[in-house]
Image: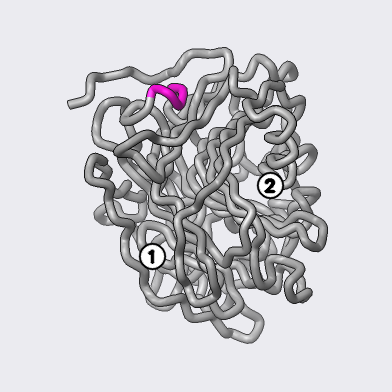
Amino acid sequence: MPRSIDHEVIRYHEERLKRLRVVATTRTPSGQILDWVPIESQDPNGTIATPPPATRHRTKVASATGMLATLETHSPGIEHGPEGTVPLRRRRVPATKKLHHTSHKRKVDGRRIRQQFESSPSGGFADPAGYYHGTMGQSTTCYGCESVLAVWDPWCELSADHSISQFGIQNYDNPQLQSLEAGWIHCKDQFGDDLLHCFTYYTTNGYSKDGNDLGGYDTDYTGWVQYDANIYPGVVINAVDWIGIPSYELEIKYQLYQGNWWFELQGTWIGYYPSSLFGSQAGKTLNDHAEWCGFWGEVYSALSDTSQTTPSMGSGQRAEVGFPFTAYQRNMQTQTNSTGSMADSLGTLSTDSSTLYDIQFGAEPFSQWIFFGGSGIGSPHVIAYPFP
């Protein structure tokens, strides 16, 4: 499926270079270009919010052998900007293509999941838009969420395909869906490489249009405020899983704190989305709460016949294969009040097409785990080694 160059994205990045007083530009080993700006220059009044108190790392389940995945910016000798500046990743020009989500994006919608599950709990249709999900979702008033994600490097047939493991929180009281999402992603069209990246995403308008203060990935448009001087949305993940060896994991969290949706990655608050992006209607938007929380694997196939989908969800192994061969999330929790209290997420499982991609809860001792995966009509493109 051909993609045209997205001149709107190019113009935005050119304007950002002028607006934010870039004082240094560096390049990472993988080729990412980082513009370093004074942290206060991101706000017209020069005011940057204060993050929530530091949180603990998630408690490891006894039978898991997980390790925190390392990020490219943790590599020895990597070049950083001057003190008092933060990095903003610049979209590579070869990757500034109009992505599929600008025209027919159909992401997870908690309302649709409820309706679909009531009519067909097992799933079983080919999505004409090319999206497939395995989701655990819960309708609940919440003020954040957290999860631990196994980190896989999935196979995608086409450069426009993508594979994702993520969570998301939504509000549709308005009644237009608003969402905050984060996790890891593989998509060559989006990043210009075949590497695995952390990502954030938001929409204020039901995925109908990305743009400044409307929605989009990472720092492709205005909305995100960078806080950390080391980790940023779009950063490359260095270590990924191979079937049968101890799992690398990514710890992520959103928390609504003092009027901002803060995002934590590997125990560090890296930045935030101002809740004002979602409007000012108290009790009606993501301005002050979410009403649905979900944890899921997602793939997108750019084939014209999407029933022939082949991207790997996670490792590509189906959910029933289990640990350590299948993608998982564990210790999923939602924030139950504005003070930061957390509770285990007790959601309902759903899948768009269980014959292509599936999901299931972990059995003991993997309580509070979900396993998900599949390769569509294809085969897993990974080597299965015996578990040590």
Residue drawn at (58%, 73%) of the image: 260
Q: Is residue 160 something one can see in this rendering? A: no
Which residue is at the front of the view, 289 or 297? 289
From the image, which quarter does the N terminus lie in? Answer: top right
Question: What is the quadrant of residue 317 in the picture?
Answer: top left
Main SS category, magenta section:
helix
Measured Cα–Cα span from mark 1 to mark 2: 28 Å
Q: Label 2 amino acid?
A: Gly
The answer to whether residue 179 is above or below residue 226 is above
Residue pointed to by mark 2: 110
From the image, which quarter does the C terminus lie in? Answer: top left
Protein image colouring: one colour
- The earlier-in-sequence mark between 1 and 2 is 2
> Mark on residue 385?
none
The answer to whether residue 42 is above or below residue 162 is below
Q: Can you give x and y, in whole percent of width and height, for residue 190 in the image? A: 60, 40
Q: Is residue 311 something one can see in this rendering? A: yes
Residue drawn at (39%, 50%) of the image: 331
Q: Label 1 amino acid?
A: Thr
Segment colored magenta: 317-321
Residue drawn at (59%, 46%) of the image: 137
Residue pointed to by mark 1: 268
Local crowd size for mark 1, using a 10 Å CA cut-off: few (<14), some (14–19), many (≥20): some
Residue drawn at (70%, 28%) of the image: 120
Question: What is the quadrant of residue 18 in the picture?
Answer: bottom right
Which secondary structure, mark 2? Answer: helix
Q: Is residue 263 left or right of residue 238?
A: right
